[in-house]
Image (cartoon, rainbow, N blue to C red):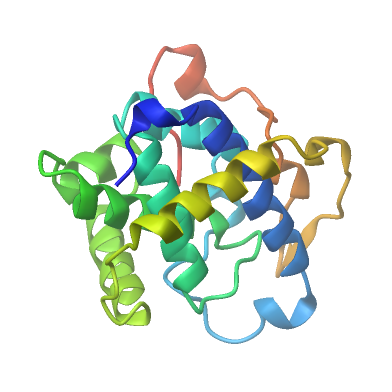
Amino acid sequence: MPTLEQYDVKLLCKGFAEELIREAIEGHSHENYEGDRSVFDSEAEEVPMVGIYEYLKRWVRWGRVGGEVIVAARMYLKRCSIKKTPVNVYRLLFVSLLVAVKQLDDQCRSNMYYSDLFCTPLPITNTMEAVFLTDLDFRLSIDPQEFVVAASQLLSLASAPDLKKTPGPPVALGHSQIPMILLTTVVTATISCYTTGLMNVLL
């Protein structure tokens, strides 16, 4: 399988972020928020106050994942039947990266490590992983040719117009709202965990 050295990991992250933003915006409709909450759904206060691109870069830096994990996570999300929305996109991204790193990296850390690193309660992490794997029917194998195609698609998306210039409406969630700006590739607010030098992001 191609390795990190063959791809610009920042461009892979940017392409992946652009794709997720578009898919989450497309999933922005009233019917997506009716009924019971999914384990992947976040309350407004739980959504990371950082763009998806920055969130991915934190996985590269602090989770120590390479480009192959980024591409594999994208492939798993493509296989996943769960529709992406502004409410669930961060947790779906988290669990797809978790599954990808455990599949590809023999020296990966435990669920507790990634839960602590990204401020996700361990029981929620374990449940999300089980639900995600069941949805995939445990189909985790990756064809090398499909991998190359997926990587090329992400690199192509990275050169597309930046979606942070496209404004979007807030998503109503009962009495709370998740501004669509949280799905852009820029930091939208400064929170205390960054100013005090902590490296975690909130889920």
> Is 20 displayed left or right of 29 in the figure?
left
- Up-down: is 58 above or below 40? above
Residue closer to the observer: 110 or 8: 8
- Give x and y (percent) for residue 180: 76, 49
Q: Residue at x 52, y 66 (%)?
A: 41
Farthest residue in the front direction? 145
At 42% from the left and 44% from the top, the residue drawn is 70
**Residue 200 showing in the rendered view:** no
Closer-to-camera residue (80/29): 80
Determine which quarter of the picture holds residue 130: bottom left
Judged left or right of residue 86, residue 200 is left
Name which quarter of the figure residue 99 lies in.
Answer: bottom left
Residue drawn at x 53%, y 84% is 36
Q: Is residue 160 visible?
A: yes
Quarter holding residue 27:
bottom right
Q: Does residue 89 appear left or right of residue 101 in this picture? A: right
Write the residue at 44% across / 12% down: 196
